[in-house]
Amino acid sequence: MSGRFITLEGGEGVGKSTQLKALAQVLVSRGLDVVTTREPGGSTGAEAIRALLLTGEKDRWNARAEALLFAAARADHIEKTIRPALAVGKWVLCDRFLDSSRAYQSAGSGLADADILALHRFGSEGLLPDRTLVLRLPEAEAEARTAARDGNAPDRFGARAGDFHRKVAAAFVDYAADEPNRFRLIDALGSTDEVTGRLVSALSDMLP
Ligand code: TMP
């Protein structure tokens, strides 16, 4: 028995967390056994690494140390949470995954995409999602939603400049063009229900 591994990706403020919960509800209502999880985090060790990554001074880590910490958190998360769930036939819905490391640490912070992929091969034997859903919003809308959510207390990544976030958003679109079978780009404008409907449609070929 083997489950499905689905990731939600996108820049800040596009509604991933809300949509992850809503999508999980729909899948459960269709009789699937669903596990929701997130990165960085999703296992005890990876949640401890999350605190190191998201709090503290803006320059607490350089880009390479940061990439290694994300890869280490992912290795633990996959071993402890994701693989065991897939092995018993569960659907795993994950808020961010490898493509966030590619977008933030490579496209945003200047590391080579090949190095991020090499870390993933070493740390996690290259496990890839069955499908990656990228939520997209116009920049001004994403900024307004992020400001409403985080106010004056963004995390270390949210605090970065607009140019960084533009590169991140563009990178996800590039990855989708390179791997059209794995990726779907999803318009995140509209009501929660409308967007959830688009996500479900983007999984229709996999649903029982
Ligand atoms: P969140 O705000 O979606 O919880 O994600 C935390 C931050 O971590 C977000 O700004 C994106 C960033 N991030 C990376 O830079 N690289 C990664 O590999 C992951 C998973 C997240």
Image (spheres, rainbow, N blue to C red):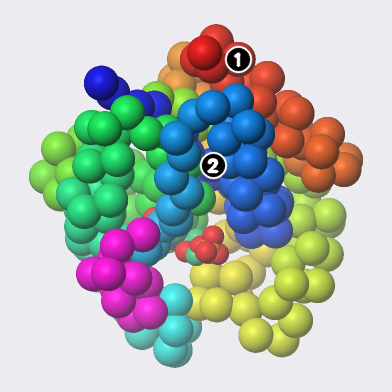
Span shown in magenta: 42-53
Horizontal and vertical percent for residue 21? 62, 49
- Is 34 above or below relative to 81? above
Q: Which residue is mark 1?
A: 204
Q: Nearer the viewer, residue 171 or 179?
A: 179
Residue pictured at 82% horizontal, 38% vertical: 193
Using the rendered image of the protein, determine whether residue 46 is visible from the camera's viewpoint.
Answer: yes
Earlier sequence position, callout 2 versus callout 1? 2
Callout 2 amino acid: Leu
Instruction: Please identify the residue farthest to the right as the structure is shown.
Output: 190
Magenta-span inclusion, residue 118: no
- The answer to whether the beta carbon of the residue marked 1 is less than 8 Å from any atom of ligand 1 is no
Q: In the image, which disc is placed on residue 8? A: 2
Q: Residues within 10 Å of mark 1 (few under 14, many from 20)?
A: few
The yes-or-no answer for disc 2 within 8 Å of ligand 1 is no
Q: Amino acid at mark 1?
A: Ser
Pick out the residue farthest to the left.
122
